[in-house]
Image: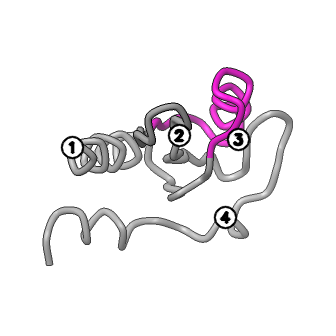
Amino acid sequence: MNALEDLIQQAIDPSLVKPEGTLTQPPSFGVYLIEDTTDGSRHYRFGSHPVRMQELEARFGNCELEYLFLSGATAAAMSSALNLLER
């Protein structure tokens, strides 16, 4: 198994977290896909779910939750790995 597959194995189903205020319980961290419609490029960002998703939607118009993790460090690693693949 490669590093990307290891990260994917750590992703959780979004139905396993429940909204609590502006965040979730347990705390979760999303990896979000942003597609640039002008040039077709794809970029990944991460952050506390769902606050980061709302920020990205406000800034870019839309984004899509690709993976959800219980660890911010794992979400950061996944975002970085996916951005490297897009180059």
Q: Quadrant of residue 50?
A: top right
Residues 78 and 71: in front is 78
Tell me, yes or no, whether the highlighted magenta stretch contains residue 60.
yes
Q: Badge 1: how crowded within 10 Å, few (<14), some, or many (20+)?
A: few
Between marks 3 and 4, how big is the CA–CA gap? 10 Å
Q: Which residues are magenta?
A: 45-63
Position of residue 31 in the picture relative to residue 85 (left or right) = right
Q: Are marks 4 and 1 in contact (CB under 8 Å)?
A: no
**Quarter of the C terminus within the rendering:** top left
**Quarter of the N terminus within the rendering:** bottom left
Residue found at x 13% / y 70%: 2
- Helix, strand or loop status at disc 4: helix
Q: Are marks 3 and 1 in contact (CB under 8 Å)?
A: no
Between marks 3 and 1, how big is the CA–CA gap? 24 Å
* Residue 69, position as x, y percentages in the image: 49, 55
Q: Which mark is residue 14?
A: 4
Q: Earlier in the sequence, mark 3 or mark 1?
A: 3
Q: Earlier in the sequence, mark 4 or mark 2?
A: 4
Q: Earlier in the sequence, mark 2 or mark 3?
A: 2
Q: Nearer the viewer, mark 4 or mark 2?
A: 2
Q: Earlier in the sequence, mark 4 or mark 1?
A: 4
Tell me, yes or no, whether the highlighted magenta stretch contains residue 78.
no
Q: Earlier in the sequence, mark 1 or mark 2?
A: 2
Q: Amino acid at mark 1?
A: Leu
Which residue in the protein does label 1 denote? 84
* Residue 65, position as x, y percentages in the image: 60, 53
